[in-house]
Amino acid sequence: MKNLFLLALIPLFLLACADGDEPDPNGCDLGTVISQELYRNSPSDEATINSLEIEGDCLKINFSASGCNGESWKITLIDSGSILESDPPQRNLRFSLENNELCEAFITRDLTFNIKNLRVEGGRVQLNLTNSGDQVLYEY
């Protein structure tokens, strides 16, 4: 009976620990990943970055891409893991889109990414979105 009780608790524990279940305390839609490997190798389907804006600890990206409705898109903001020594310091980011939708609609969206994990010493860092050429200064 005791073993049956423990077996019943395992699925509850796994559900409680699943990634993404915790709401972002800053109210951002997604997190930011720091990974040199993902920075180099993640999907890079065609997207147009229309604007970047900092709202608290969230980076708001307005972008457009072709598709049916954008519901199947897989979107990731990836930091290269390197900090460029300058004044202010700089970090290189890449907006990764995996888009398997075969429709001709052109969809525009806003998404926010939690960038708190990109902070460096000194209270500010310039974020370079390498696949768009855009930059934005993050001050905290």
Image (cartoon, helix red, strand yellow):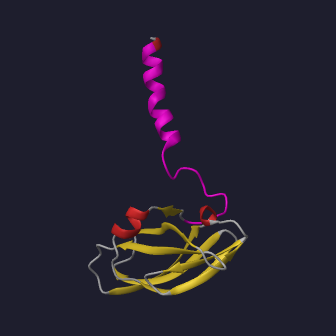
Quadrant in the picture for the C terminus: bottom right
* Identity of the residue furthest to the front in this view: 85
Q: Where, by quadrant of the figure, is residue 117 drawn?
A: bottom right
Q: Is residue 20 above or below residue 116?
A: above
Residue 137 is situated, as x and y percent measured from the top left of the image, at 65, 80
Residue 48 is situated, as x and y percent measured from the top left of the image, at 43, 86
Residue drawn at point x = 56 percent, y = 66 percent:
29
Please check the rendered image and state whether residue 12 is part of the magenta-colored stretch, yes or no.
yes
Q: Is residue 51 visible in the rendered structure shown here?
A: no
Task: Answer with left or right where residue 99 lies relative to residue 21.
Answer: left
In magenta, the rendered stretch is 3-29
Please check the rendered image and state whether residue 26 is part of the magenta-colored stretch, yes or no.
yes
Residue drawn at point x = 46 percent, y = 81 percent:
130
Residue drawn at point x = 39 percent, y = 74 percent:
70
Task: Answer with left or right where residue 127 lies relative to residue 122.
Answer: left
Q: Is residue 123 above or below residue 2?
A: below
Q: Nearer the viewer, residue 108 or 28?
A: 28
Q: Where, by quadrant of the figure, is residue 71 drawn?
A: bottom left
Q: Nearer the viewer, residue 134 or 92?
A: 92
* Identity of the residue furthest to the top in this view: 1
Quadrant in the picture for the N terminus: top left
Q: Nearer the viewer, residue 112 or 77?
A: 77
Residue 14 is situated, as x and y percent measured from the top left of the image, at 46, 37
Residue 69 is situated, as x and y percent measured from the top left of the image, at 38, 77
